[in-house]
Image: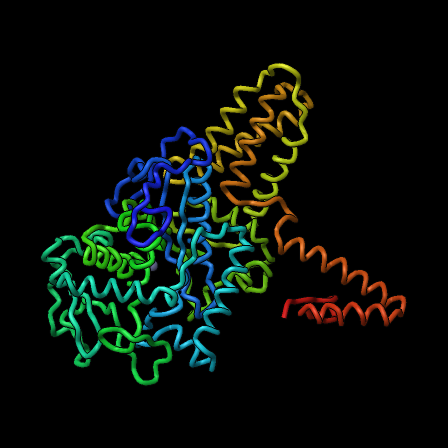
């Protein structure tokens, strides 16, 4: 992995200073590639390269994606806490993601809305970023876009062709999975599909119009149909890259041919990630990531989320409470707390009861931290010094077990119970120095690693508070028949793209 990209020149980045001192740890991760929990050992001591498959920006991000990105944000935050210098790359797919009918998702979104594809991409990328901010996610170190890396993708297609692992048909280029599987004996390793099973399907399974030699072959370059809007010239045709290719090209560009962690939702394991591995192997002969981490899916009321039977909820509906599945709105921090209660690798069931409990849990957590912060330690040593330092330290390091946030949270709640007991007893038996360390540990876990914020601290809740204030002032003005003030407030808000509506249940507002 290179930390400074300078063409073909490789910097010895291990000589670069590590900014924070490394903390002793015993991190193990569940590696999808080997199906084992393994001791985490970075390729270069002190440095980590991590690639996570980002959103396809033709529509709003759904709650399952939010869970995936929140999980990797927590993973990133923990690695940084341990003292690693992490280069975190999360892409934006704005070209090449095919629908079942073979149409590019971006092009289809644009065609339906009569917009330029880049207009669609821009709009939804902005909305995606807004949503990530609501959940308090760190921005990645690099957020490359597929459309900005066409030359790199063309080069990778060329490399795979040069290695004899792809073929050209009518201007499109297909990856030859049969040849790859026979030569490398690895296709299917990540998804657990057996090569024999893959190869047992014959040419008869192919549709007549299909140009592929084998059903498991996949396009790495597609010739654009005449009405296809997004197209680039290449040695083979005017067209666009296959979806799987962008992640191979961009992870290689920014993290090198072999890097530490590749992540994504487990729905991407096959074919997306399997094909990424094949492409990297097929172009440079090495498997891209040492550790593959996958987040699991969401259920709602015990069933798979599905738009067609209405068993779904968007993040916005969850925040506003505007859904038949919830009795009220939940703040992004409550939702994030709720997500932390399930390990990222397990399915997570969303129910209103569980969300209500999470809201209580979140407030209990924040209340406990406030009490802790309000404590005054005694001079010298106190009885609880060692116990409390150990409790908070151990709660943090439960994360060493494959980023086990639920275990970490449970251990931290034991500590909160101890704090509450102290608070109720009114005794003070902790030393000032120890207390400082305990508070630092609590802050590190809850704010830095879990990414939670105190109530009222998130951008949405503070905006809610400000709007409530403005609406109250306007209401007072209306009661006083001061129409100048009430109209000025409405007009000035409209100029800021905030619309207010007076209804029978009071005044509502929304950002236009
Ligand atoms: Zn990807």
Taking the view exactly as shown, the residue that stands out farthest to the top is 380
Relative image position of residue 157 (x, y in whole percent): 23, 65
Q: Is residue 66 above or below residue 455?
A: below
Q: How is the image coloured?
A: rainbow
Residue closest to the eye, 412 or 493: 493
Relative image position of residue 189 (x, y in whole percent): 20, 52
**At 22% across and 75% down in the image, what residue appears?**
236
The image quadrant that residue 219 belongs to is: bottom left
The image quadrant that residue 78 belongs to is: top left
Q: Tell me which image quadrant ligand 1 sits in.
A: bottom left
The image quadrant that residue 366 belongs to is: top right
Number of marks in the rendered image: 0
Residue closest to the eye, 290 or 47: 47
Relative image position of residue 346 (x, y in whole percent): 37, 48
Relative image position of residue 257 (x, y in whole percent): 27, 51
**At 44% across and 78% down in the image, what residue appears?**
110
Q: In the rendered view of the protein, which quadrant contains the C terminus?
A: bottom right
Q: Is 204 positioned to the left or the right of 239 in the image?
A: left
Q: Is residue 45 above or below residue 107?
A: above
**At 42% across and 36% down in the image, what residue appears?**
18
Residue closest to the eye, 341 or 446: 446
**At 34% across and 81% down in the image, what residue appears?**
228
């Amino acid at each position: 992995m290179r930390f400074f990209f300078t063409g073909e020149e490789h910097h010895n980045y291990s000589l670069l200073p590590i900014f924070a001192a490394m903390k002793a740890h015993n991190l193990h991760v569940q590696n999808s590639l080997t199906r084992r929990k393994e001791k985490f050992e970075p390729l270069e001591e002190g440095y980590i390269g991590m690639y996570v498959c980002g959103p396809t920006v033709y529509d709003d991000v759904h709650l399952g994606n939010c869970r995936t990105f929140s999980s990797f944000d927590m993973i990133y935050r923990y690695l940084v806490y341990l003292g690693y210098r992490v280069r975190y790359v999360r892409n934006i797919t704005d070209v090449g993601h095919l629908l079942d009918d073979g149409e590019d998702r971006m092009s289809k979104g644009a065609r339906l809305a009569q917009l330029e594809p880049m207009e669609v991409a821009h709009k939804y990328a902005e909305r995606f970023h807004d949503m990530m901010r609501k959940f308090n996610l760190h921005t990645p170190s690099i957020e490359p876009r597929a459309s900005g890396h066409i030359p790199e993708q063309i080069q990778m297609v060329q490399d795979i062709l040069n290695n004899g692992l792809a073929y050209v048909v009518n201007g499109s280029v297909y990856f030859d999975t049969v040849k790859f599987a026979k030569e490398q004996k690895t296709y299917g390793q990540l998804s657990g599909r057996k090569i024999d099973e893959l190869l047992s399907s014959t040419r008869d399974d192919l549709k007549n119009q299909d140009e592929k030699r084998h059903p498991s072959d996949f396009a790495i370059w597609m010739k654009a149909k005449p009405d296809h809007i997004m197209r680039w010239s290449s040695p083979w045709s005017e067209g666009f890259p296959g979806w799987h290719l962008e992640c191979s090209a961009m992870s290689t560009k920014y993290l090198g041919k072999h890097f530490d962690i590749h992540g994504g939702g487990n729905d991407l394991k096959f074919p997306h990630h399997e094909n990424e591995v094949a492409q990297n192997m097929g172009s440079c002969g090495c498997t891209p990531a040492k550790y593959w981490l996958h987040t699991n899916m969401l259920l709602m009321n015990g069933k798979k989320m599905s738009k067609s039977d209405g068993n779904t909820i968007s993040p916005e509906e969850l925040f506003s409470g505007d859904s038949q599945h919830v009795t009220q709105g939940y703040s992004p921090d409550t939702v994030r707390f709720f997500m932390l209660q399930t390990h990222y690798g397990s399915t997570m069931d969303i129910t209103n009861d569980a969300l209500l409990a999470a809201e209580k849990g979140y407030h209990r957590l924040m209340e406990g931290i406030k009490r802790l912060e309000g404590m005054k330690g005694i001079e010298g040593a106190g009885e609880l010094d060692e116990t409390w330092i150990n409790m908070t330290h151990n709660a943090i390091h439960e994360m060493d077990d494959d980023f086990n946030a639920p275990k970490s949270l449970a251990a931290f709640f034991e500590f909160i119970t101890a704090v509450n007991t102290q608070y109720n007893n009114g005794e003070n038996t902790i030393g000032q120095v120890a207390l400082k360390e305990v508070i630092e540990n609590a802050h590190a876990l809850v704010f830095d690693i879990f990414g939670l914020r105190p109530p009222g601290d998130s951008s949405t809740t503070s905006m809610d508070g400000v709007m409530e204030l403005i609406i109250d002032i306007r209401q007072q003005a209306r009661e006083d028949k001061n129409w100048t003030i009430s109209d000025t407030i409405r007009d000035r808000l409209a100029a800021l793209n905030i619309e207010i509506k007076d209804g029978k249940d009071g005044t509502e507002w929304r950002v236009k």
